[in-house]
Image (cartoon, rainbow, N blue to C red):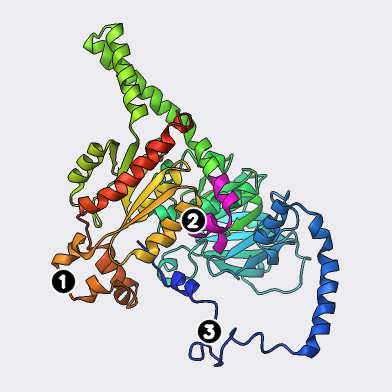
Amino acid sequence: MVQYHRYHQWKKGDVCLDEESHPFGGFVCENSKRAARPKLLFLLLLSFISFSFILAPLFFTSAPTLSLLYSFGFEDEGLSSTSDVYASVCSSVSNGSICCDRSSIRSDICVMKGDVRTGPASSTITLYRSNGYGSHVIGASSENDEIFQHEKIKPYTRKWETSVMDTIDELDLVAKGENSAIHQKCDVQHDVPAVFFSTGGYTGNLYHEFNDGILPLYITSQHFNKKVVFVILEYHDWWISKYENILPHLTQYPVIDFRGDNRTHCFPEAVVGLKIHDELTIDASLMGRNKTIRDFRDMLDQAYLPRIRGLIQEEEHETQLDMNRSALSPSAKTKIEMTGEKRDLKKPKVVIIARNDSRAILNEDSLVKMTQDIGFQVEVLRPQRTTELAKIYRSLNSSDVMIGVHGAAMTHFLFMRPDSAFIQIIPLGTDWAADTYYGQPARKLGLRYIGYKILPQESSLYNEYEKSDPVLTDPDSVNNRGWEFTKKIYLDRQNVRLNLLRFRKRLLRAYYYSLAKKNGRLHHQIQ
């Protein structure tokens, strides 16, 4: 799990710097009250009054609009295709110019406005503008090839993580004079903006696909009202297939493979990179921007509902064929259907997310039997990278409880209905990440979260290390040695053998909770 990264450790300790860590010594925020002087009070009061007059018009704006203003820094919530959406420093990009906002620790984003043309062979996006626009020329390869501005960008949302950013393709953004345009004719002319982004990096890990890709892409596309073309670097066919239900809700146009399509595509505007804020990640957005994530969940429902209905029809058709082949009488068919329906209505449903590699549940069969004995319907789900998400969505959206060992697959909690129960099994050394990335967000999403922290005896590491080894007795000290130790020991080499008597208590809690909720929730499932 690559989300255990120093960036999040940095986030936990970014309030005050001590004497040793601050480059100039002393404390940054310890003595702020003592630093105030009585003689400044009058000036502060006067400044506050003046500032209040400046801000007064904002208080006549609705609260939702204000929250968006503060979140994105744009002046008008209704703007849908201007660069105000992306960054306050680029809120007024003039025609024929490039503006880049590099202030975020998470991602860079550049806005190009005017005659924008792609050049995949040279990894270049060129903006052509009037030669009279400005007199400053950076360089020239010929008389008609003036370069007025040159920027470089890697359009991926983990800017702080050097190791993964080294794997991301870099783009050259160049502004040239209009005379140069004769050397690059448009093969395809678009009348809507483009958004360029990469599906490289950690793509293939579900957490990162949503956190670093789908969620910021959703946020970006909403401000275009789907009138935008996605241009993808490091394009993957399987990624397109995996998210084929979601993409039509983000864009009305076919996706373009930047490397694979050698034609010159021309746009009136281009956004390179995806804007992502600390408040708008899976873990933080659920805590600080509940409306955003609720809207995102609603979009997922809309995206998958048609396909789920199709799956149900296919299953009903297969069932009918089986009945016909069995030559059952109508009364027998009715009896089977009624029995199945009654069973479904009576028993809460559990979906166990199974892992095939590390952090597997070694006594999974016994867990399934115990869960059935308690009174649950049980489905064991083994997601693969190529598994159709609509099928997973259907299973989880119709379930009452999800059980799984901490890992990227726990991101599937986004597919569950509010008020469902989520039991996360927490292996040794994963406490903080399990709660930060899945526990707290699940609570904010309205799920009944139950964490099950295993004992050392339930870990496969118990048989590999001395009983007094810090790996078993003090996982924090091991994690503090660096990410490579966390990954090597706790993520890649650890499996779980549940103490079923101990785990049964969590299951019973989820069972009685689900049973109490079920009578009032029967009609809320996707059908």
The first of marks 1 and 3 along the sequence is: 3
Task: Residue 222: give x, y in percent of width and height.
Answer: 62, 47
Q: Is residue 99 left or right of residue 60?
A: left
- Which amino acid type corresponds to the residue marked 1 in the rendered image? Tyr
Pointer 2 residue: 282
Task: Residue 252: give x, y in percent of width and height.
Answer: 59, 39
Q: Is residue 317 magenta?
A: no
Report the residue at 57% width, 52% height from top.
290
How busy is the neighbourhood of tag 3: few (under 14 within 10 Å), some, or many (20 plus)? some
Spatial separation of the CA atoms under disc 1 and disc 2: 35 Å
Spatial separation of the CA atoms under disc 1 and disc 3: 37 Å
Spatial separation of the CA atoms under disc 3 and disc 2: 27 Å
Query: What residue span does the magenta drawing correspond to?
Result: 277-296
Q: Is residue 78 above or below residue 426?
A: above
Pointer 1 residue: 465
Report the residue at 43% width, 62% height from top.
436
The first of marks 1 and 2 along the sequence is: 2
SS for callout 2 = helix
Pointer 3 residue: 17
Residue 225 falls in which quadrant of the image?
A: top right
Q: Nearer the viewer, mark 3 or mark 2?
A: 3
Nearer-the-camera pick, 66 or 431? 431
Quadrant for the N terminus in the image: bottom left
- Which amino acid type corresponds to the residue marked 2 in the rendered image? Ile
